[in-house]
Image (cartoon, rainbow, N blue to C red):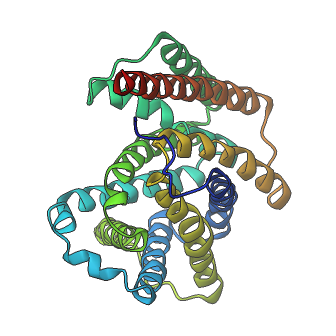
Amino acid sequence: MAESLIDESSSKTQIILLLILAVSMVSSASIFIRLSTSPPLVIVFWRTLYGALLMAVIGAARRDFSALRKPVVRENWHWLIAIGVTLSLHFSTWFQSLSMTSIAASVVLVNSSPIFTALLSTLILGESLRRRSWVGIIIAVVGAVFLAWGDFGGTDFVALTGDLLALTGALFLALYFIGGRRFAKEMPITVYTSVIYFIAAITTLGFCIPLNLNVLVFEPTEVMIFIGLAIFPTVLGHSVNNYLLTKVPAYVVSSAVLGEPIGATILAALIFFELPGPTTIIGFIVILIGVAMVLADIVTKERSRVSSLDDTNGS
């Protein structure tokens, strides 16, 4: 019998509820970031540091940290460090983009990560993409160009730079998801996330120091924003996503995350009265259609692979 796409220790209902929780929580991230007056890198530092501390407390209460003595953890420290650095780069590029372009544009572009996942699978893993995936990629690229052209055509180079930073963040998010799918299942999720978040915090601090950014921010409102970022989009969002990566394929998590642009755009309209223009809305929809096509093709391909393995094992 081939391996099920969903870990048999978890029910489909549980998976769906966790996906809904994660998407609703990560949708709040862009709002917290916009509310903060601190530099983007400082926000990244405190978000990941507080996130690491919260997950470490939960892990300590559950006595999960004995897993650090396991050979599989000791032998893969270099990969954990690489994943933590990747998370820092994802947050750093995306947070900066939010200060330069609209929330709708930034969030939809950063969540185009499945496109990069598909391309990386071809370039690194040698997994050929089918025609439908290539069509989806082309559609998403056209949508991204259209969205960015709205900024460029208006000579808003700051917004265009923000769009490009969001796309860069999408690339790092794809790498982060791939790493999580490979290594998160090797240890308790509290241990994995606290280690990854702490490495991300140290990496971001390394960016802040040469830029002379003051990370010692203790103004009550800012601290509350940092803690809010750590609790809602980090612990209840990213950490839940990392847990889900141990239960379902990465494309399932990636597809659910596509709900974030919708939630973030609605929140931005309600809180900041930031309504996306026609160009942004069109680009937004085209990108989501393209990404959805890629994900649908990946799902079909994966199911065909599992069915083929079932037939082989049954013969």
Residue ID at (42%, 42%): 174
* Quadrant where the image shows the C terminus: top left
What percent of the width, then of the height, locates residue 206?
Answer: 28, 68
Q: Toward the viewer: 95 or 247?
A: 247
Residue 152 seen in the figure: no
* Quadrant where the image shows the N terminus: top left
Residue ID at (23%, 56%): 79
What is the quadrant of residue 52 in the picture?
bottom left
Residue ID at (44%, 65%): 41
Residue ID at (59%, 52%): 98
Instruction: List the single residue furthest toward the top.
Output: 131
Q: Toward the viewer: 107 or 163?
A: 107
Q: Is residue 116 above or below residue 256?
A: above
What percent of the width, then of the height, locates residue 22?
Answer: 62, 59
What percent of the width, then of the height, locates residue 188?
Answer: 38, 70
Instruction: List the single residue furthest toward the front.
Output: 315
Residue 302 seen in the figure: yes
Q: How many marks?
A: 0
Q: Toward the viewer: 315 or 39?
A: 315
What percent of the width, then of the height, locates residue 48?
Answer: 44, 71
Q: Is residue 67 above or below residue 247?
A: below
Q: Is residue 40 left or right of residue 30?
A: left
Q: Is residue 44 left or right of residue 67?
A: right
Q: Is residue 155 above or below residue 103?
A: above
